[in-house]
């Protein structure tokens, strides 16, 4: 189920850091387990608001959540990631709830995910991989089909880094490309996280795609459909001459083998289908009308 962290804290998306903290402190005081012993609903509400605060109080996590939404955010961040580096002890100590401070209560309520390294001084910190970063990368239709290289400007650690990214042939919108070692710094000597590029493919004015096959519409005259003809069909890279058989019907397809999505990972290339559109003239000369009338008399 999708989570709305802003709704959980009762704040707007435009709320600043002070407003976020104030909203959390008010709700945490109300739902803290020491004030609601053996109240499962209050405990669940406390978990909800604490998770929301752990994300929204962290600039990097908040940015990822705001940019990509709840579903994509939770595909990249586990509950342990969410609470990593979250410092809630000061807030709990302000409540004066005895020994149930930030470190202790997280271990009891959230279990292993809440009581990970950084909350217990008795635990020895283990190396942890840095956070994965996410970016949307918009590429043209042609490059998505054929592959190629794309420059990406990555804002990382306060600096802009230019990356040359290889786009494999056949990528589609929604697909993610992983760039190793271009995410957040690891903790306690752990490896750097990765950069995840979510692909967005622009539409093409003349081509559409279904799986590995491409489709384009080509127009032929009425007489060409009746008698047969030859026409030029544009592919993504070239122009090919094809023959149209006599009696071709509107909506028929002519296959150009191998001119679809490029070959990749052992899979054969897709095909390009030229979809025939028979043009019916809107205006006729007197001579054309006379000829058509004669054809009409011949049941054509």
Image (cartoon, rainbow, N blue to C red):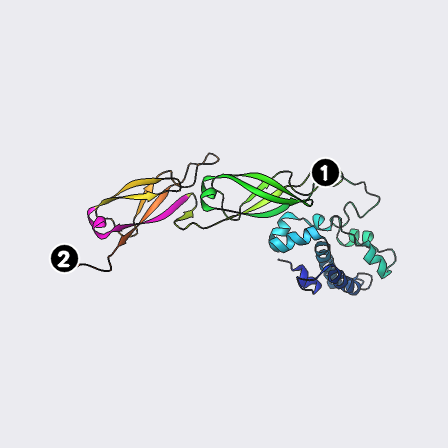
- Image quadrant where residue 3 sits: bottom right
In the rendered structure, which segment of residues is drawn in magenta?
A: 213-227
- Image quadrant where residue 289 sits: bottom left
Residue 55 placement (x, y as % from top left): 70, 54
- The residue carrying pointer 1 sits among few (fewer than 14), some (14 to 19) or many (20 or more) residues within 10 Å by Cα, namely few
User: Which secondary structure is most common in the magenta stretch?
Assistant: strand
Q: Earlier in the sequence, mark 1 or mark 2?
A: 1
In the displayed structure image, the side of residue 139 where residue 278 appears, left or right = left
Q: Are marks 1 and 2 in contact (CB under 8 Å)?
A: no
Instruction: Tell which of 80 and 37 is nearer to you.
Output: 80
Secondary structure category for the residue under label 2: helix
Q: Can residue 121 be found in the magenta stretch?
A: no
Instruction: Tell which of 285 and 4 is nearer to you.
Output: 285
Residue 108 placement (x, y as % from top left): 79, 53
Residue 211 is marked as: none
Q: Is residue 54 visible?
A: yes
Instruction: Tell which of 80 and 166 is nearer to you.
Output: 166
- Considering every residue shown, the one lying at the far top of the view is 266
Residue tagged 2: 287
Residue tagged 1: 190
The residue at 47%/36% (across/down) is 264
Which quarter of the figure is the N terminus placed in? bottom right
Residue 58 placement (x, y as % from top left): 72, 53
In the displayed structure image, the side of residue 299 where residue 52 appears, left or right = right
In the displayed structure image, the side of residue 25 where residue 212 appears, left or right = left
Residue 68 placement (x, y as % from top left): 60, 53
Q: Can residue 220 be found in the magenta stretch?
A: yes
Q: Is residue 245 visible?
A: no
Secondary structure category for the residue under label 1: loop
In the displayed structure image, the side of residue 1 where residue 239 appears, left or right = left
């Amino acid at each position: 189920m999708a989570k709305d962290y802003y709704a959980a804290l009762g704040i707007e998306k435009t709320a600043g850091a002070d407003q976020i903290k104030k909203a959390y402190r008010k709700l945490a005081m109300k739902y803290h387990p020491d004030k609601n012993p053996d109240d499962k609903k209050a405990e669940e509400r406390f978990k909800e608001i604490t998770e929301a605060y752990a994300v929204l109080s962290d600039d990097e996590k908040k940015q990822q959540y705001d940019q990509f939404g709840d579903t994509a955010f939770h595909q990249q961040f586990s509950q342990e990631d969410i609470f990593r580096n979250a410092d809630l002890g000061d807030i709990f100590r302000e409540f004066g709830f005895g020994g149930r401070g930030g470190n202790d209560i997280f271990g009891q309520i959230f279990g292993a995910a809440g009581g990970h390294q950084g909350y217990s001084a008795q635990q020895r910190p283990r190396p942890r991989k840095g956070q994965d970063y996410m970016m949307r990368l918009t590429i043209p239709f042609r490059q998505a089909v054929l592959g190629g290289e794309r420059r990406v400007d990555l804002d990382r650690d306060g600096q802009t880094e230019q990356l040359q990214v290889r786009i494999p042939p056949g990528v589609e919108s929604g697909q993610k490309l992983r760039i190793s070692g271009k995410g957040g710094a690891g903790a306690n000597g752990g490896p750097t996280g990765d950069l995840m590029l979510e692909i967005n493919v622009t539409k093409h004015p003349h081509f559409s795609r279904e799986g590995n096959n491409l489709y384009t519409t080509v127009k032929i005259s009425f007489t060409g459909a009746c008698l047969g003809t030859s026409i030029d069909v544009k592919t993504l890279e070239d122009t090919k001459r094809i023959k149209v058989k006599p009696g071709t019907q509107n909506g028929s397809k002519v296959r150009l083998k191998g001119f679809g999505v490029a070959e990749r990972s052992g899979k054969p290339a897709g095909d390009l289908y030229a979809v025939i559109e028979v043009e019916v003239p809107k205006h006729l000369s007197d001579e054309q009308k006379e000829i058509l009338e004669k054809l009409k008399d011949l049941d054509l």
